[in-house]
Image (spheres, rainbow, N blue to C red):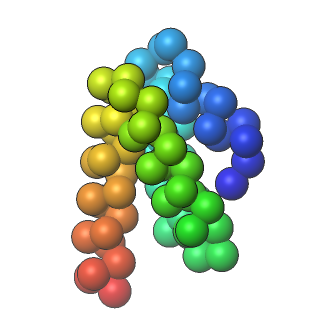
């Protein structure tokens, strides 16, 4: 995961942020070696306490958890 993904996820444009947060989740699923860093980044985003960032990060974590449990 790049620092750029994290920067994008803290932008003001809500739609852009949601896409950036989702991309962090997709990266964690597609490239398993990045999963721990991606989860750490998502947890850091939750700590921002910005509503739309927190909401999207939680959704991404839950969806990815469901995907892993199906495998």
Residue 58's place in the image compared with 71, above or below, is above
Total numbered badges shown on the rendered structure? 0
Residue that appears at 30% across and 24% down: 51
Residue that appears at 61% across and 61% down: 37
Choose top left, top right, bottom left or bottom right for residue 18.
Answer: top left
Q: Position of residue 45 (x, y in %)?
A: 47, 39
Residue that appears at 57% across and 68% down: 36
Looking at the image, residue 33 sits to the left or right of residue 54; the answer is right
Looking at the image, residue 57 sits to the left or right of residue 9; the answer is left
Looking at the image, residue 60 sits to the left or right of residue 37; the answer is left
Residue 9 in view in this figure: yes
Residue 6's place in the image compared with 14, above or below, is below
Q: Position of residue 53 (x, y in %)?
A: 39, 30
Choose top left, top right, bottom left or bottom right for residue 61.
Answer: bottom left
Q: Position of residue 31 (x, y in %)?
A: 62, 71
Residue 31 in view in this figure: no
Choose top left, top right, bottom left or bottom right for residue 27.
Answer: bottom right
Q: Quadrant of the C terminus?
A: bottom left
Residue that appears at 36% across and 51% down: 60
Q: Quadrant of the N terminus?
A: bottom right
Q: Position of residue 19 (x, y in %)?
A: 48, 35
Residue 8's place in the image compared with 5, above or below, is above
């Amino acid at each position: 995961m790049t620092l750029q993904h994290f920067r994008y996820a803290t932008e003001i444009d809500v739609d852009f942020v949601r896409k950036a947060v989702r991309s962090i989740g997709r990266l964690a699923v597609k490239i398993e070696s990045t999963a721990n860093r991606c989860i750490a980044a998502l947890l850091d985003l939750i700590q921002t306490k910005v509503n739309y960032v927190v909401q999207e990060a939680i959704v991404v974590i839950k969806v990815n958890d469901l995907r892993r449990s199906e495998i």
